[in-house]
Amino acid sequence: MSQIMSFINSILNYFNYDFVRYALLAAVFISIAASLLGIPLVLKRFSFIGDGLSHTAFGAMAIATVLKLSDCNLLVMPVTVICAIILLALNNYTKVKGDASLAIISVTSMAFGYFLMNVKSTAANVSGDVCSTLFGSTAIITLTKKDVLFSAVVCLIVVLLYVFYYHNIFAVTFDESFARSCGINVTLYNFMIAIVTAVVIVMAMNFVGSLLITALVVFPPLAAMKVSDSFKKVIAVSALFAVITSVLGVLISVVFSTPVGATIVLCQALSYIVFIIIKKLRK
């Protein structure tokens, strides 16, 4: 009991630091946005768009680093959004479909980024910079009020999309042919989801790194589907799952000095296993 109280007191003491409060707030906003966007991506079997876009963001980050831009997002954000549009265009209008187009763009971006950072970077520790970008590291302690507000705005946009266009998203997710027959602009919704996903991916790089972002998109919806019997319940459970596991991961990381990204992903993976067990017990 004393160890539990000591752990709680340690957590409360850390709340005196601005970077901890900023990290927790941003974790809540980003996890909600990523989990909600992950639902249509998982159900449409296009969840690895997060992986492809994260690799693209890594390549753009490498270019921004070499150019010594004061704000890397000025380059990373538009490049990632453009690649999201290209991915959907390749999937819809060419013979290079889904996983193949993702592989082409993601692998090329990753290779280009690593090549550029090794050839042109003037940093003393290139390997450290690469690992930090890939797996997330010190970026979480440099968050500012601006970063938190931006993540809050993006989260609000995602939530409002579900509030005002719930039925359209539901139709596009489960049956695009039916959605078209109802007069819904399926292409517009697909592009809209892809663009917002690209923005969330860039924000999430500060927490889990470009290689682990897919976990934020995939684990919450999959866990919610294990215990929910309706689309609305999946939305609610997915968001709740994402918030709890992300906050828990940040707190564990701060208290025990573990890697932030890996800790969050492991919390989600272990929680997902618990949801699988719950489903089996319910049967």
Image (cartoon, grey):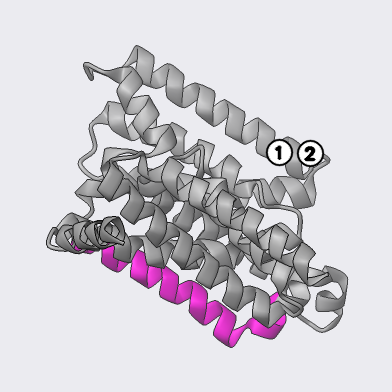
Give the mark nearer the N terminus: 2 vs 1. 2
| Mark 2 → mark 1, Cα distance in angstroms | 6 Å
**Residue 77 position within the rendered picture, expressed as x and y whole percent measured from the top left:** 41, 50
The majority secondary structure of the magenta stretch comes to helix
Question: Is residue 15 visible from the viewing direction of this image?
Answer: yes
**What residue is shown at x 75% (from left), y 72% (from top)?**
172
Work out whether residue 212 or residue 3 is closer to the camera in this orientation and state it. Answer: 3
Q: Amino acid at mark 2?
A: Val
Q: Position of residue 111 (x, y in %)?
A: 52, 22
Looking at the rendering, the stretch of residues picked out in magenta corresponds to 145-169
User: For mark 2, what is the residue?
Assistant: 96
Q: Does the rendering let one see residue 147?
A: no
Locate residue 28: give its quadrant.
Answer: bottom left
Q: Secondary structure at mark 1?
A: helix
Q: Is residue 221 magenta?
A: no
Location of the N terminus (image quadrant): bottom left
Give the residue displayed 75% in from the left and 62% down from the top: 43
Q: In the picture shown, does residue 166 fall above or below 198?
A: below
Extreme residue toward the front, this view: 1
The foreground one among 182 and 277 is 277
**Residue drawn where x is 74% and y is 40% of the image:** 99
Residue type, label 1? Ser
Q: Which residue is mark 1?
A: 101
Residue 155 is covered by the magenta coloring: yes
Q: Residue at coordinates 28% horizontally, 41% vertically from top-left?
A: 257
Would residue 163 be found to the left or right of residue 171 on screen? left
Task: Check disc 1: other Cα within 10 Å, few if <14, some if 14-19, many if 20+.
Answer: many
